[in-house]
Image (cartoon, rainbow, N blue to C red):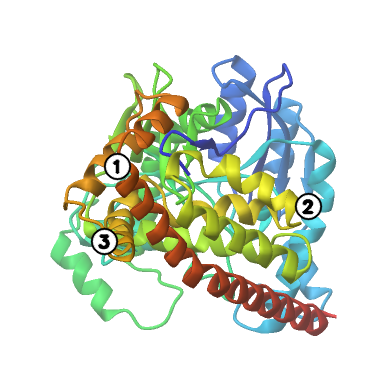
């Protein structure tokens, strides 16, 4: 996908109305209260259609619904589990995970009629795959931009991230993330997803305890639940973090999300649209109570490049195996895209690949994405080798800078489509012949490998899904 081809996380509906929002909560609902107040008084440019709670008997959902005249929906998760013979809602067994999937589907049946554009988890405790149905934002009591070896240090439930930050001697921050689905017990997926915003730094209130004392308490812990000074300190700081962190970052992130100012590219990188309408690659956006938000521009490094590549391949795999049609139909499309990506210049591949997919009855999605073997970033490595091999095939005498000249023309954004073709033709017969000779050899190798590889992956994926469906039945 070209650099400029950024897709908003929340596409425009084409309807002249505010975005509709579901707010999900489990407890006291201070964040929900804050959102509802801002929506009622105007600063929040979206409309909260309903409140949902998994704990109708203990949460403040009904109270807030009456206060702001908003419908309240509920499905008690604990009762749902008890009715199916389970007294614990953890995801530590296959049966409990199956019940969670069943509960999620039941919740969606309740919420779907509201026709909302996205949901906000405001103190919503249960892990759920609702994000597979509708975009979901979640506010978290920790700075999720802080990582070590690719792992978010301040991820975790409730007091865990706050206790870690206290013991690390760090100030506290709240984060708003775009929630991702989970699998298995959910531990690996917990608090994943793009970090849309972080709050200002909030100092820790130690309440008379020293950092050394709290660290010793942590070392002396045995079995939860913990009722010690560290937990007491964490709970007190969570309350102050809500006021100075959650209540700052959540409403602003919700408003920018509703306005379509967050997006992603094919590799899953997060972007933010600034006031001029330009997309910026970001790590996150820092929000403040009394000044304009500050996008934190994403810096490139080797580790992030590797993660970007992994996300790109995951995206391509997902598009491949979830495509509709027979395995042969899907494989034909991808192999056609691969052929075009090898033989046709990078700036005009799609206008060749799509018609061929109709002619040979292959997947249109596969034909388009299959051309991604050569993109402006990958062509830098592929075309020099392609031209060198092609030069050997035609027994030419091209110089080492021939590929550089070719790439300069292909990547020149100031040239029109026709001008690029004209410049390509002016480069001489030898260069053009070497380009196509090397490309045809590359295509001869890669096209059949792509066809059989894609077909194998689609068949295997569908077989696994079929077995999983039978097991659930």
Q: Position of residue 83 (x, y in %)?
A: 84, 74
201 or 371: nearer the viewer: 371
> Helix, strand, or loop for circle 3?
helix
Q: CA distance from mark 2 to mark 3?
A: 37 Å
Q: In which quarter of the view is residue 328 placed?
A: bottom right
Of labels 2 and 3, the one closer to you: 3
**10 Å neighbourhood of mark 1: few (<14), some, or many (≥20)?**
many
Identify the mark nearer the N-term, 2 or 3: 2
Tell me the quadrant of the picture where the C terminus can be found: bottom right
Q: Nearer the viewer, mark 3 or mark 1?
A: 1
Residue of label 3? 303
Q: Residue at x 16, y 61 (%)?
A: 211
Q: Position of residue 339 (x, y in %)?
A: 54, 59
Name the N-terminal-most of marks 3 and 1: 3
The correct choice, above or below, for 125 with respect to 416 in the image is below
Q: What residue did someone put label 2 on?
A: 108
Query: Measured along the vertical axis of the image, is residue 317 above or below residue 412?
Result: below
In the rendered structure, are the residues bearing label 2 and label 3 in contact, judged by CB atoms less than 8 Å apart?
no
Percent x, y of residue 291: 31, 19
Q: Is residue 375 left or right of residue 366?
A: left
Q: In the image, is 137 to the left or to the right of 51?
A: left
Q: Nearer the viewer, residue 185 or 150?
A: 150
**Residue at coordinates 72% horizontally, 58% vertically from top-left?**
362
* Cα distance in 3D space between marks 2 and 1: 53 Å
Q: How many marks?
A: 3
Q: Is residue 361 visible?
A: yes
**Mark identifier at residue 406:** 1
Q: Secondary structure at mark 1?
A: helix
Q: Is residue 403 above or below residue 182?
A: above
Instruction: Indicate which disc, 2 or 1, sits on the residue closer to the N terminus.
Output: 2
Tag 2, which secondary structure? helix
């Amino acid at each position: 996908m070209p650099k400029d081809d950024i897709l908003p996380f929340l596409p425009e509906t084409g309807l002249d109305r505010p975005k509709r929002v579901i707010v999900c909560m489990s407890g006291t609902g201070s964040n929900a209260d804050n959102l509802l107040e801002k929506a009622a008084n105007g600063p929040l440019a979206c409309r909260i259609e309903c409140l949902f709670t998994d704990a109708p008997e203990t949460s403040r959902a009904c109270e807030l619904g009456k206060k702001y005249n908003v419908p309240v929906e509920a499905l008690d998760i604990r009762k749902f589990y008890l009715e199916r013979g389970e007294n614990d809602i953890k995801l530590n067994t296959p049966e409990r995970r199956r019940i969670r999937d069943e509960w999620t589907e039941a919740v969606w049946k309740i919420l779907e009629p509201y026709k909302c554009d996205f949901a906000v988890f405001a103190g919503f405790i249960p892990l759920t795959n609702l994000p597979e149905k509708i975009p979901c934002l979640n506010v978290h009591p920790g700075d999720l931009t802080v990582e070590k070896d690719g792992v978010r240090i301040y991820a975790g439930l409730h007091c865990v991230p706050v206790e870690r930050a206290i013991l690390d001697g760090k100030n506290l921050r709240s984060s708003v993330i775009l929630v991702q689905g989970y699998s298995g017990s959910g531990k690996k997926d917990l608090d994943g997803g793009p970090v849309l915003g972080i709050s200002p730094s909030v100092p820790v209130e130690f309440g008379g305890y020293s950092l050394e004392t709290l660290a010793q308490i942590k070392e002396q812990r045995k079995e939860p639940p913990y009722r010690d000074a560290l937990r007491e300190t964490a709970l007190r700081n969570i309350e102050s973090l809500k006021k100075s962190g959650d209540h700052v970052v959540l409403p602003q992130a919700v408003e920018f999300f509703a306005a379509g100012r967050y997006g992603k590219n094919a590799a899953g990188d997060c972007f933010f649209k600034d006031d001029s309408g330009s997309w910026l690659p970001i790590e996150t956006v820092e929000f403040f109570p009394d000044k304009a938000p500050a996008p934190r521009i994403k810096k490139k490094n080797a580790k992030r490049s590797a993660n970007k590549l992994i996300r790109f391949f995951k995206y391509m795999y997902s598009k491949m195996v979830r495509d509709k049609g027979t395995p042969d139909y899907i494989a034909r499309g991808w192999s056609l895209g691969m052929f075009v990506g090898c033989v046709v210049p990078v700036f005009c591949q799609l206008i060749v690949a799509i018609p061929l997919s109709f002619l040979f009855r292959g997947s249109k999605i596969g034909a388009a994405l299959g051309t991604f073997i050569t993109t402006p970033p990958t062509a830098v490595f592929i075309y020099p080798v392609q031209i060198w091999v092609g030069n050997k095939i035609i027994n030419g005498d091209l110089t080492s800078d021939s590929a550089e000249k070719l790439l300069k023309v292909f990547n020149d954004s100031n040239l029109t489509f026709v001008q690029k073709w004209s410049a390509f033709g002016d480069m001489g017969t030898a260069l053009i012949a070497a380009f196509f000779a090397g490309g045809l050899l590359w295509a001869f190798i890669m096209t059949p490998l792509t066809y059989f590889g894609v077909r194998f992956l689609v068949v295997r994926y569908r077989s696994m899904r079929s077995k999983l469906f039978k097991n659930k039945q």
